[in-house]
Amino acid sequence: MSINKNFKDQFNAKKNAGTHGEDLAEAFLIDAGYEILERNFRHGKGEVDIISLLDNSLLVFVEVKLRKTGDFGEPEAFVSQQQSNRIIQVADHYIHAINWQRDIRFDVISIRSDTGEVKWFKDAFY
C-alpha cells in the first residue's frame, strides 16, 4: 500500500506551517522575557507546544494555533475542551516530574498567517 504523494505533500506542508507557527510564538515569548524550556513536550496522548518560564516563578504551558485565514473562525477558537484537558494532563505530569512548587498558567497564542496578527491569551483555560 502506498500513500498518495499529494497527501504526503499536504501533510508535510501542514507540519511545516505548524512548526513555523511555533517558531513565531517562541520568538514572541522570548521577546516578552520568557525562557523556553521545552517544545512539543509529549506525554501519553497529549502534547504541549511550548513550556516557558517567566522570572523563575511562573511556569507557562502554551498552545499555539495557526490558521491561514479567519474564514472559519479565529485560530484560538479551535482549542477544544478535550484538547485543553489533554494539555492539563501533560502539564500535570511535567509539574510532578520537575517537582514544580510555584504558579502555573495555560496560554494560547493565536496566529493568522494572512494578516500576520498574533494574539496572546493569558490564562486561557484551566
Image (cartoon, rainbow, N blue to C red):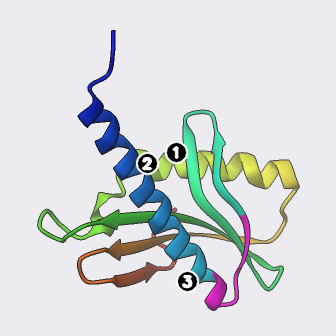
Vertically, is 42 above or below 102? Answer: above
Vertically, is 111 above or below 3? Answer: below
| Distance from the alpha carbon under mark 2 to that under mark 3 | 23 Å
Q: In the rendered structure, which amino acid carries the disc numbered 3?
A: Phe
Q: In the rendered structure, which amino acid carries the disc numbered 2?
A: Gln
Please identify the quarter of the rendering in which residue 61 is found: bottom right
Ranked by sequence position, the earlier of labels 3 and 1 is 3
SS label for mark 1: helix
- In-image side of 67 versus 109 (left or right): left
Q: Which residue is the site of mark 3?
A: 28
- In-image side of 4 versus 104 (left or right): left
Contact? badges 2 and 1 (CB < 8 Å) = yes
| Distance from the alpha carbon under mark 2 to that under mark 1 | 5 Å
Residue that sits furthest to the bottom in the current view:
32
Q: Which residue is the site of mark 1?
A: 86
| Distance from the alpha carbon under mark 3 to that under mark 1 | 24 Å
Image coords of residue 4 (percent x, y) = 26, 25
Q: In the rendered structure, which amino acid carries the disc numbered 1?
A: Arg
Residue that sits furthest to the front in the current view:
5
Q: Bounds of the magenta span?
A: 30-37
Image quadrant holding the N terminus, namely: top left
SS label for mark 3: helix
Image coords of residue 63 (percent x, y) = 50, 62
Q: Which residue is the site of mark 2?
A: 83
Q: Is residue 119 visible?
A: yes
Image coords of residue 18 (percent x, y) = 43, 58
